[in-house]
Structure formats: structure tokens, C-alpha cells
Amino acid sequence: MAVVAVDAMGGDSAPSEPVFGAIAAAQANPRVTIKLVGDESVLERELEQLDSVPGNLSVVHAGDFVTMEEAPVEALRKKKDSSIARAATLVAEEEADAVFSAGNTGATVVASSLKMGMLDGVRRPGITIPVPTTKGSCALLDVGANIKCKPEDLVNYGCMGEVYANVVLGIEKPRVGLLNVGQEDEKGNELVKVTRQMMETSDLGFVGNVEGQDIFMGKCDVAVTDGFVGNVLLKVIEGLAESIFEVVERGMERDRVDSLLESPFYNKVKANLTYDEYGAAPLLGTKGVCLIGHGRSTAKAFQSAIAVAASLVDRDLMGHMSERVSRSRAGST
Amino acid sequence: MAVVAVDAMGGDSAPSEPVFGAIAAAQANPRVTIKLVGDESVLERELEQLDSVPGNLSVVHAGDFVTMEEAPVEALRKKKDSSIARAATLVAEEEADAVFSAGNTGATVVASSLKMGMLDGVRRPGITIPVPTTKGSCALLDVGANIKCKPEDLVNYGCMGEVYANVVLGIEKPRVGLLNVGQEDEKGNELVKVTRQMMETSDLGFVGNVEGQDIFMGKCDVAVTDGFVGNVLLKVIEGLAESIFEVVERGMERDRVDSLLESPFYNKVKANLTYDEYGAAPLLGTKGVCLIGHGRSTAKAFQSAIAVAASLVDRDLMGHMSERVSRSRAGST
């Protein structure tokens, strides 16, 4: 019976896409309660256009919102009653179990960290996404929450990535790799060199350095990197996949070979690499569940993200995460 | 009449692939002179298996070689007569115009930098590759020569990338972008923040921060990043492209849609993203021409790299590079 707070003012097409997505999610998941957080008058106007509003959906007022362009910390300081701060507060005050926003990512990370608080022993949260591989999925993190990582942050990402891969991806004993420019011990910058030593003496299922191509070959189930590299990578993966699919399909058209478009397998692969379908990336390290969506999230992406948020709550992802991190800390002291 | 020194002991399949590639290149480019550098007895044995050896190909003896696993600086210090050091020395002593190696990348970078020397004003060299975009190509650098970059290194990569994009990719006024996690000024780590300010006051055709997806959308002709990020990216691009082509083709097979494999357009795109075809990446910043190949370079890749090396010499890439860097330095003082 998860309660999901949705930032109805976040995303390029807010509030219409969040509202339509939330309605669809409420209808499809009658056991989930949805709280749409945003300007009451704006949201009521959206809802009035509908024939009926599901009983498991309600509006929570927030008088302001953070725009996509604002600097997160400053915006949150200035706008005390922003929709993302209000949504994160609902989780902190146990009026909701999870928050989802497709708005300003930095503001979502900062608001969730400050309002919900961090798991004991975690300094900074990380965002993870499952990257499709030829064998399944690999959890890549951090893809942008923490641009200036310390080695202990990366070790925590390894721990939390393990729990995510286990609980969400269903991998019994996840193999954790450290993203680097080579497999040898002496490779890399200072951050990865120190991290590698810490990971080796930790209780992680650590398989050593991994390189970019190893992610797709399924050599690890969790690939750890700092938020700068991870964010550049995430966008390269999205951009490259999009451009390959574009040229493949343009090629089919030009050469009059269009039957591949009807291939279920091709379409599955394409869907796995297309943002609308995977919908939302969990923020790991905060005490409550927080999911982060792409700015261009559609109603369909909102609907899917709300369902994912509810399932993470049902599976007690954060309980497992907290237990895992404190076990690791106990072992290292 | 370029003279190309080939490290015949470098690469996973040395010396057979380098030798076969060099023979094919010598036959296809009668005006190019090729010097195969490596253990004379080993190379002579390879050549003896052939019916005839082209007159524009000769062997230069080097008694030792650096393995793929060795730490570059230490290996070069210990092995004075390694094939890569000998090949770079040939260029330094004007007995060759260019060097190509598919061996230990770090050793190739260090040997070329030390033996040939750096262009005035350049502290560290960078490796560039042309990434195919939906509109053409974008020169990405550094993809792995310089793991610990300073802002001035990145500014130089912008300058040298401009010349590469102009001379090699044929772009009249290349647009230079700085790879970052967002387009806004305040985004990124310290390195990119300082670099951005320096680039803005430089004489570069600077278009500001670019993100991962922008590379493929053709938003810039040169994308500058440090060697850690660039190397991880290069391998992600290769690995993702390979895995997408694999699943696309597996999908076609499973669904009995195989006519795309006969599509010239599909095959062109695939070739552009497959290492064997693009063959070699130039090292920029050294006084002589140096090309770096993938460890798994085939004879075909060697042949193509030798032809590329000769054409860079013919077009006086390093002369243009030197002129451009000193013009930029003159402007900034």
C-alpha cells in the first residue's frame, strides 16, 4: 500500500504530463496512493478537464517550484515552498513512502538528501540506471548526483549498487566493478587508485577494474564511477543508441528493408535503450525512496515511474540498503 | 614520399598482422616507404614465407619490445632498444616521417613525446578519434594519452582538435565544445570550470559546454575532455555500438529479417563504428606524426593506418598544428 508523492511541477511538460501519468498510474494500480504535489489551482484546473478523478489520487499544495535552469541549492533556499521540497518533506514526515520528480535533477537530489536525511555512513547519494547488456543489465552509478566524489563515496556506491542489483535486477551475488581506463592495478587517476585499494579490502563482491566495453559484455553487474564520468556516459549511451537506431532505420527505409521494424526482438532492444520506457532512475543513499526522471518524461514515463516507486517501497529497498551499508561499516572498523 | 616506421612488435597478433598489413600497404602505395621495426630474425622469418617483398619495405632492427601489460615509463627505461623507442627515434632523426604502433598505448605516447619532442607550448599530447555523428564526424580528444589533465592541456586540445578537424575532416571553421555534465556555466568539476573560462577568452571557435548526446547530434566538430573521461567514453562507444549491432543482427536472424545485412547504408554505419575500419588514432602535440592502433588491429587495420599516416605527412598536419598553437599562444600573452 505504497504512497507515492509526485512532483507535478517538474519536467519539460509539467503539469499536464505528470497529471496524466499520475491518473493512469492510479487507475492501473488501485493499491497505490498518489499525492500530486504542486500549485493547487493549476492542478485542480488540469483535473477538472477529466470525467472523473480516481479515489487514490489527491493534490498536496506547494506554492512554488524550481525551474530546470536554476542552481539547486540557491533555488531551494529561496523557494521554501517548492513542489520538490514539499514532496520530499512528505516522505520525511511519513505521509508518503517515495517521491518521483522529472524536474531539476540537482534540486531533487539536494531536497531529498536534506529532507529525508542520509542512511548512516553515507555522505552523498548516487543515481543509478540499469544499462542493458548483451546478457541482461548492469547497474551504473553514479550518473550525476555527485560530481566531486571521494573514494568512500564510490565504495558506498558499490554497496548500494549491490543491493539494487540484488533486489531490483534479481542477481543473487552481484559482481562489482570499478570503471577505469585499464584492468591493471596501477591504471587511472588518484580517485580510482585509492578506491580500488579500499574496495579490495571491503566485503564487496569486487571484480576489480572494468573498462567501458566490459559494461556491455556483462563482465560486472554493478559498474561504479563518479558523477561526472557517469553523467557524461549516460548521455553518450542515450545519444549513441538514438543515433544508431536512427541510421539503422533510415538505412532500412532507403534500401526498402523495413521488416525489421516489425521484429519484436529489435523493438525490445530499442525500448531498453530508450528513456521513455525505463522511466526513472533511483537515488540511492537517502533514507526514503526517491526516483529521478528525465526532463522530457512523458505521461507514460510518469506512469511507469510511479509503479516502479511503489514496487521499490513494497520490496523495502531502503531497508535492505541501510542494513547492507551498516554491515559493511561494521566489517571495516 | 612519406616514410612510415611501423612498430612490428606491437599489437595482440604481432608480428604476423603488422607484417602482412605493411606488405599490403607497400603494394597499394608504391610512393610510400615503410620501415618495419622489430627483431630482425623474427621479421626476416615472416618475410621469407612470402613470394616477394616489395622494394619500398625494409626492416630496421630493434632487439626488444614493450609488452601490452608493462608500465610504460619503467618499460622504456629498462628496454633501451625496444621497437617503439627505435621507431620514434627514426622520426626524431628524420629517417622516417611518421610512426604507427598497435602496441602498448602508454609506451607509444611516452616514447613519441620523449624522442620526437613536443610542439612549443604543448605540455602533454592527446589522442583523437573521429566519432561518427548523424551529420558527419566529431573529433573527440583526449581519449587516453593524458589521464591527469590541466586546464591548459585542454585548451591546447581545442587548438589541435581544430587543426585536425580542418585538415583531416575538411571542416572549414570547426566548432569546439567542452564536454561537461550540463550546458550552464556553473556546471562541472574544477577542471572544466577553469578550462571553460580559459576557452572563452581564447581564439578558439568555442561553442561552450556540450553534453554526451551533443557529440552524436553534431553540435560541435571537436569535443574536448580529459584522458580519463575520454578513454572510458571511447570504450563505451565501441562496446555499445558492437552490442547494438550484435542484437540487431541476432534479432534479424531470429525473426528471419536478414535483408538489412545487404543494405549498403547499414554497412557503412557499422563500418564507421568498427575499429578495424577506422584503424588508427593520431597523437597530437608531438613534433612528428604518431598514430596509435587498437591492440586487436588486424593486417587490414595496419594497412589502413599506414596509408593514413602517409596522408597526414603529405598534408603537413604537424606544420599546421605547430603554426596554430603558436598563434594561439601569441594571442594569449
Image (cartoon, coloured by chain):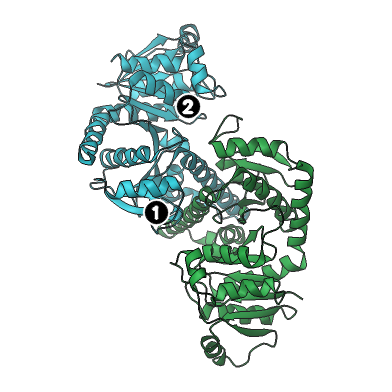
Chain colours: A green, B cyan
Q: Quadrant of residue B160?
A: top left
| Quadrant, the C terminus of chain A | top right
Amino acid at pointer 2 = Gly
Note whether residue A304 is visible: no
Q: Residues within 10 Å of mark 1 (few under 14, many from 20)?
A: many
In this picture, is B16 found above or below A194? above
Q: Write down the residue under mark 2.
A: B106
The residue depicted at 32 percent of the width and 31 percent of the height is: B122
- Does dot 1 land on a helix, a strand or a loop? strand
Q: Which mark is residue A249?
A: none
The residue depicted at 68 percent of the width and 68 percent of the height is: A309
Q: Position of residue A192 (x, y in %)?
A: 58, 38
In this picture, is A93 found above or below A292? below
Amino acid at pointer 1 = Val
- Does dot 2 land on a helix, a strand or a loop? helix
Distance CA(mark 2)–CA(mark 1) = 28 Å
The residue depicted at 44 percent of the width and 34 percent of the height is: B146
* Tags 2 and 1 touching, CB below 8 Å: no
